[in-house]
Amino acid sequence: MSGRFLLFVAALLAAVVFAACNRTEQRAPEPSRRTATVTVSPSPGGATATVPPAPPQQLRVAFVNLASPLPLDAGEPVLSDTFEERLAMLIEELRAFEPDVIGFNEASWTQAHGSASAILAKELKMEPFYARANPWFPGQTREQSDALVKQVGFEEGELILVRTDRFPLVRMEMIDDGLNPRTSETGERRTALHVVIRGPEGIGEIDLYLTHFTGGGDRVREAQASDFVEWIGETRGEGPIVVMAGGSDPAGASVYTVFEAAGLTDVVPLDEGVGTCCRLSVVGEQEPLTQRTDFLMTDGWMPASSGLFADEPGQRPDGTPLYASDHNGLLATFELASWSR
């Protein structure tokens, strides 16, 4: 996403300058707390239940990068041209898995394609929880960032979908000022999302975390991972924890060492042949992925099963192979009875 973001920098900077020149009132400083807690009302397209379901026995989790429809090369708009097809492929595969929780990196809204979050929530009948990553420049309030999104016609961030009929929402929060440091001097940033859900009796609250590292180089990504881990330590409860952290750069292993040091372990084996990044294109024959940049982690709670999804192509009407993303996704099924404090 880092390269695609640069295409908008000139427009964003112009919009920021325009807004600054036309601002007539001085806003109060932002609160010192980094975390913004958001009150959420159920959406019409979210999960609903007329009869209380039986207490869940499993927690089924999926995690994938959506590959934003904003192209790196305006002359090669394949990510944009195939976006609706690719979303439909993911929806079909996820329905078959029947997840309780799904994490998405690069969840976008564009004028051309609308809101990926709204489409996914409606089609999968799950409740969406979202944190904007970009555009959000240093010093901007949320209202100023909202206005900038409308001006440039684009945003992307982190999305968690939840079956709230099975695992009710307790609260959600995000890092409003982004992970420290920012990814680039142009203003690109990374953020993090925390959703707390209620498990069945004996489990209590379950903490879900999601973030995405891309661009900036190893040193920046490691510093952002350390900031993320520190925030987890400040905000998590005493129950189960599931952490989804994605990346779009080859040096994902250096970030993973930060998570290991914090006691987090990837539940999908870090073996050869379990790569997640990154295809040169989503169209046509592609080499198998061998680099691991996306991680689905807990602090010792191991799943009954785990693996990949979105790793096999579908076919376009003309027979051309089409992949749902430039990443492979990760799946894990946890037996709730197997968790212990």
Image: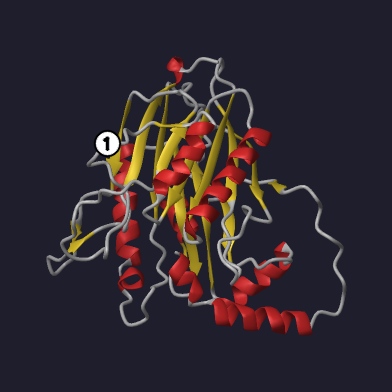
Question: x%, y% of residue 140?
Answer: 72, 67
Q: In this view, does 245 lie to the left or right of 135?
A: left
Residue placed at 45% from the left, 60% from the top?
116
Tag 1 secondary structure:
loop
Residue placed at 64% from the left, 40% from the top?
231
Q: In this view, does 18 lie above or below 222?
A: below
Question: x%, y% of residue 68?
Answer: 42, 64
Residue placed at 51% from the left, 46% from the top?
160
Q: In this view, does 8 lie to the left or right of 94?
A: right
Between 183 and 276, the residue placed more toward the observer is 183
Instruction: Say few, some or many: other residues with alpha carbon within 10 Å of mark 1 (under 14 / 14 to 19 / 20 or more).
Output: few
Does the rendering let one see residue 73? yes
Residue 296, image quadrant: top left
The residue where tag 1 is placed is 271
Question: x%, y% of residue 75?
Answer: 32, 82
Between 120 and 265, the residue placed more toward the observer is 265
